[in-house]
Image (tube, rainbow, N blue to C red):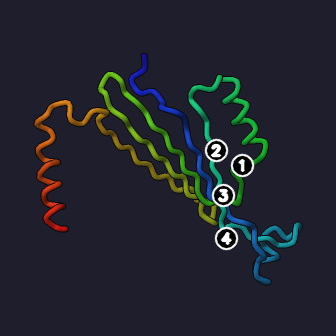
Amino acid sequence: AAYNQISGGVKLARLNSVPGTCSQDMKSMYDSRFGGRCFKTSETTSDNQYIFYHDRYEDIVQQLSNLSAAQWLDQNTTKLDIDILFYNAHLQSYSVHKQTFRFAEDGFVKLYFRHETFLAEPYRNILWIIPDIFFGIIILRML
């Protein structure tokens, strides 16, 4: 058995810009054959896709092939977030993984990621509740 199992699925969140009209100076340089549209310069829309862990392998491959054929990621994409929740039964913990790709206007791709792990049962030892009680008292005194 693997230590980290995906819980539920993978979320793909895309932020897309709508191609806009270029300024007169830029029309000759960008997409001049199709009316001089500029990318990543106007309003954005968001779209989510989910790849579920429990689906059959063939269905997952088909879903990814459909996204590729539809050019789900294209020159209008400004950001892609990939979110995954893992469960580790051996350590009784969850891990959240978030990976972000930012696509700049000049073609540069910047990658960010964050990984955070927390216990499935945080009060397995009753003494672990003491810091939380003190924190709760501090918060209540502030109110």
Sort mark 3 into few (<14), some (14-19) or many (20+) by Cα contacts within 10 Å: many
Q: Amino acid at mark 1?
A: Trp
Residue 80: x %, y % from top left: 58, 52
Residue 59: x %, y % from top left: 70, 27
Q: Earlier in the sequence, mark 1 or mark 2?
A: 2
Sort mark 4 into few (<14), some (14-19) or many (20+) by Cα contacts within 10 Å: few
Contact flag, marks 1 and 2 (Cβ < 8 Å): yes
Q: Earlier in the sequence, mark 2 or mark 4?
A: 4
Judged from the image, the secondary structure of the residue bearing numbered disc 4 is: loop
The residue to which callout 4 is attached is 43
Q: CA distance from mark 2 to mark 4?
A: 20 Å
Q: Which quadrant holds residue 37? A: bottom right
Q: Earlier in the sequence, mark 4 or mark 3?
A: 4
Q: Earlier in the sequence, mark 2 or mark 3?
A: 2
Mark 1 or 2: in front is: 2
Contact flag, marks 1 and 3 (Cβ < 8 Å): no
Q: Earlier in the sequence, mark 1 or mark 3?
A: 1
Residue 122: x %, y % from top left: 24, 36
Quadrant (top left, top right, bottom left, bottom right) of the C terminus = bottom left
